[in-house]
Image (cartoon, grey):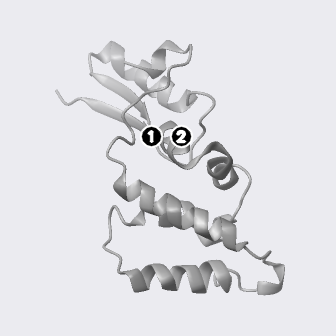
Amino acid sequence: MLDVLLVCMPFGPVFSPSIALSLLKGGLKPLGIPVAVRYFSIDFAELVGQDFYMGIARDGRPTVRELAGEWIFSGALFDAAPADEARYVEEILRQRGGWTTRTWARPILPALIDRILRARRRRRTDPTAGRRCFAGSAPATCS
């Protein structure tokens, strides 16, 4: 029988366990299926800082149109040359290329662009990311 790992990826919630993952785990356990839940979201929030993490996850800084959260992790699947990184920053973050009507787009501050780049680089270099589960009171979240 296969083991099951249920994963809460960034930029999911960090201050409460996922009810969906907990319910899935609770449904699989009585069937004898080994299952665990891992919260990579917590590890990444600790790595990049709560304010930055919550800015993307909850506050829309930058907005979903820029896909900054996805872009931070895209290097895990796709090789990206430094020119690709520069192009994303220039076309999407600075010129606001994700917006068809750019007058609606609020500018992204250079300091936020720097934090996004640092988060992407940290994600690539931290070998310990994603090794803990939620330590809250809900028993179905940790194995």
Secondary element type, mark 2: helix
- The picture quadrant where one finds residue 95 is bottom right
Q: Considering only vertical position in the picture, is 97 above or below 51? A: below
Numbered circles on residues, count: 2
Label 1 element class? helix
Q: Pointer 1: what residue?
A: 40
Q: At x 55% / y 31%, what residue is drawn?
A: 18
In this view, 45 is above or below 37: below
Q: Nearer the viewer, residue 46 or 40?
A: 46
Q: What is the x, y in percent for residue 64?
A: 65, 64
| Quadrant in which residue 131 is drawn | top left
What whole-number distance in Å separates the C-alpha atoms at marks 2 and 1?
10 Å
Q: Quadrant of residue 128?
A: top left
Task: Please rate how many residues cluster around mark 2, counting C-alpha atoms within 10 Å: few if below 14, some from 14 to 19, many from 20.
Answer: few
- Asked whether 115 or 105 is in front, the reply is 115
Q: Position of residue 3 (x, y in %)?
A: 24, 29
- The residue type indicated by label 2 comes to Glu
* Disc assigned to residue 46: 2
Picture coordinates of residue 116, whole percent (x, y): 57, 64
User: Would you say the residues marked 2 and 1 are in contact, meaning their CB atoms lie under 8 Å apart?
Assistant: no
Q: Closer to the observer: label 2 or label 1? A: 2
Q: Tell me if 106 is positioned left or right of 85 in this view.
A: right
Quadrant where the N terminus sits is: top left
Answer few, some or many: residues within 10 Å of disc 1's Cα (few below 14, many 20 plus, some between 14 and 19): many
Q: Tell me which numbered mark, 2 or 1, is placed earlier along the sequence.
A: 1
Q: Which mark is residue 21?
A: none
In the rendered image, residue 41, in percent from the top left (x then y), is placed at: 51, 41
Residue at (83, 85) in percent of width and height: 103
At x 42%, y 86%, the residue is 83
